[in-house]
Image (spheres, rainbow, N blue to C red):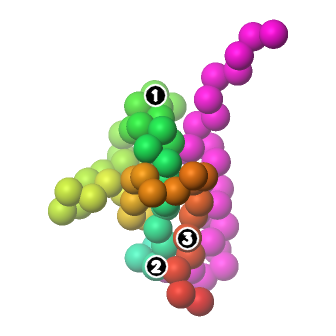
């Protein structure tokens, strides 16, 4: 059986970020806590528009949401304090 390519963090988290914004969660309150693997995949994903990833004060952001790399066993979108 052929091994499937890794699923893009872009595809997993873009819709979650958009849904959180629609529910009224502020971008500045959210944090993407990514595994080191997912942060690398996101940065190298050719389907992710360059404009969607940026660095502010040395911190990587995706769609304006701050990314924390490593320290988690599974990547998650943290909505911050409710």
Give me the disc on residue 9.
none
Q: Earlier in the sequence, mark 2 or mark 1?
A: 2
- Relative horizontal placement of residue 3, taking residue 59 as reference (left or right): right
Q: Earlier in the sequence, mark 1 or mark 3?
A: 1
The image position of residue 33, as x and y in percent, is 49, 60
Comparing labels 2 and 1, the label whose residue is closer to the camera: 2
Q: Is residue 44 above or below residue 50?
A: above
Report whether residue 40 is seen.
yes
15 or 42, which lies in front?
A: 42
26 or 81, which lies in front?
A: 81
The reply to whether discs 1 and 3 touch (Cβ–Cβ < 8 Å) is no
Q: Please, what secondary structure does the residue beneath circle 3 have?
A: strand
* The quadrant where residue 59 appears: bottom left
Q: How many marks?
A: 3
Q: Tell me if mark 2 has few (under 14), some (14-19) or many (20+) residues whose alpha carbon lies within 10 angstroms of its own.
A: few
Distance from the alpha carbon under mark 1 to that under mark 3: 25 Å
Residue of label 3: 78
Q: Which residues are magenta?
A: 1-26
Residue of label 2: 29
Q: Tell me if mark 3 has few (under 14), some (14-19) or many (20+) residues whose alpha carbon lies within 10 angstroms of its own.
A: some
Distance from the alpha carbon under mark 2 to that under mark 1: 27 Å
Residue of label 1: 46
Residue reaching furthest bottom? 82
In the rendered image, residue 28 lying in the magenta stretch gets the answer no
The reply to whether discs 2 and 1 touch (Cβ–Cβ < 8 Å) is no
Q: Is residue 57 above or below residue 8?
A: below
Residue reaching furthest top? 1
Comparing labels 1 and 3, the label whose residue is closer to the camera: 3
């Amino acid at each position: 059986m052929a091994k499937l390519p890794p699923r893009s963090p872009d595809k997993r988290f873009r819709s979650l970020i958009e849904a959180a914004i629609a529910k009224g969660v502020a971008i500045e309150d959210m944090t993407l806590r990514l595994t080191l693997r997912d942060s690398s995949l996101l940065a190298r994903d050719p389907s992710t528009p360059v404009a969607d990833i940026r660095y502010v004060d040395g911190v990587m952001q995706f769609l304006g949401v701050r990314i924390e790399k490593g320290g988690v066993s599974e990547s998650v979108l943290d909505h911050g304090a409710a």
